[in-house]
Image: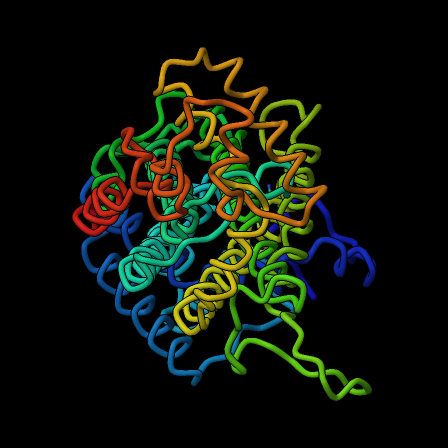
Amino acid sequence: MAKMWAGRTAGETAALADELNSSIGVDGRMYAQDIKGSAAHARMLSKQGIISEEEKDQIITGLEGILKDLSSGALAIDQTAEDIHMFVEAELTKRIGDAGKKVHTARSRNDQVALDDRMYLKDSVDELCAFTEKLIQTIADIAERESSVIMPGYTHLQRAQPILFSHQILAYAFMFERDIDRMKDCKKRMNVSPIGSCALAGTTYDTDRDFEAELLGFDKPCLNSIDGVSDRDFVVELLADLSILQMHLSRFAEELVLWSSWEFRFIELSDAYTTGSSIMPQKKNSDMAELIRGKTGRVYGDLITMLTVLKGLPLAYNKDMQEDKEAVFDAVDTVKLCLQVMEPMLAGMKVHADRMLRAAGEGFINATDLADYLTRKGMPFRDSYKITGSIVNYCINNGLILENVPLEKYREYSTLIDKDVYEAIDLMTCVKSRISKGGTSPESVSEQIKYLIERA
Ligand code: ARG
């Protein structure tokens, strides 16, 4: 097929070269951004007297028709076109004739693709933030609904101290809040328009880049045309943000997998988000949570892809950069899907408060509270710590828990211990007395929930 860029060359490209060169299968999804960009470009060209008012109107009407037909399915993207920019321009010229050939005045595909990338990813950030926000609100709702559930808090995956279940899941909500902040911050830098940079050096035409940037909703045009067409740092930045977000999802997913195992049985995921086994009839597998965890690898891979593509590229545009879209679209799609599955999966999970409480009662997780009790009675903390350790040992050797140790036995270890010790080591007391800001007390948890709900 004759190429639109066949200026100097006359020979045909090899079929496999076309296959390697083609990006339409990936960048076709940017058609709306490409068309919007071209319409704004035509408006700018006409305002500057570079094309006539009539040509501008023809171009815009033509572009609107293409957008409508692509959206409705009346027009299919020609997969033999090299990329979406070529396809839209060819279709436009097919529809309106010579005026269509003028839309590429004072523009290059180099600034055009950078523009489309930025426009598409700005929209993606908005969507990703909305899904993440929905997840935060769902976590806050669950935290409110399950506000009295006590579970063991872990360090090293060993039972450590009693906490509210709400406190544990709210920790993720704060991580997701930072993920939103990061993406919004990334969008600020994305929001600078490269269009008008042209191939790399700017143009001889009297263009108005500020006007065009404003028409397209950008804060400003970039100040260096080479930078405008050469960098994809905004892609890398979004991929890094998505990697962190997916890492958070993955850790949460890992807890869901653990908690829904028969060993823990803290929660039960709904049938809508689990699968059975083709051979073992008793199984209820947490495949969706596992996949959210597993998909993290590909998101990290996308980040590494992009860092590697850019490393060592001389300025300005190089075709290597076409690889940006496959990587970033894959990450955007993956994270979007995982967010959309995670939210209803959490909303529908059953919380087994009894199992969590039982687990909390089995691991001496109130030992710190016993040590704190002794310290409050006047013993230096290091001594309280040691004595409590000996009491725990005694319990282990005699099949007891701290709640069942008789008072006389306690007093063999320290006469500072009185019958109020039982109240002090009661799990609910332990939780309630963690009153420090950000601690696991019910007041602190309500404060967290209130903050998260109000931020929405
Ligand atoms: N399809 C190309 C890309 O995604 C568009 C830019 C092509 N520019 C060029 N000089 N060949 O990067």
Name above or below for residue 141 compared with residue 162: below
Name above or below for residue 420 compared with residue 151: above
Name above or below for residue 31 compared with residue 279: above
Q: Nearer the viewer, residue 281 or 84?
A: 281
Residue 177 picture quarter: top left
Q: Nearer the viewer, residue 319 or 440?
A: 440
- Name the side, left or right, on which 278 lies relative to 418: right
Residue 455 drawn at (x, y percent) = 20, 45
The residue located at (35%, 27%) in the rendering is 222
Residue 342 drawn at (x, y percent) = 48, 63
Residue 86 drawn at (x, y percent) = 53, 58
The reply to whether residue 439 is in sight is yes
The reply to whether residue 109 is in sight is no
The residue located at (38%, 32%) in the rendering is 418
Residue 89 drawn at (x, y percent) = 46, 60
Residue farthest toward the front in the current orientation of the protein: 408
Where the N terminus falls, by quadrant? bottom right
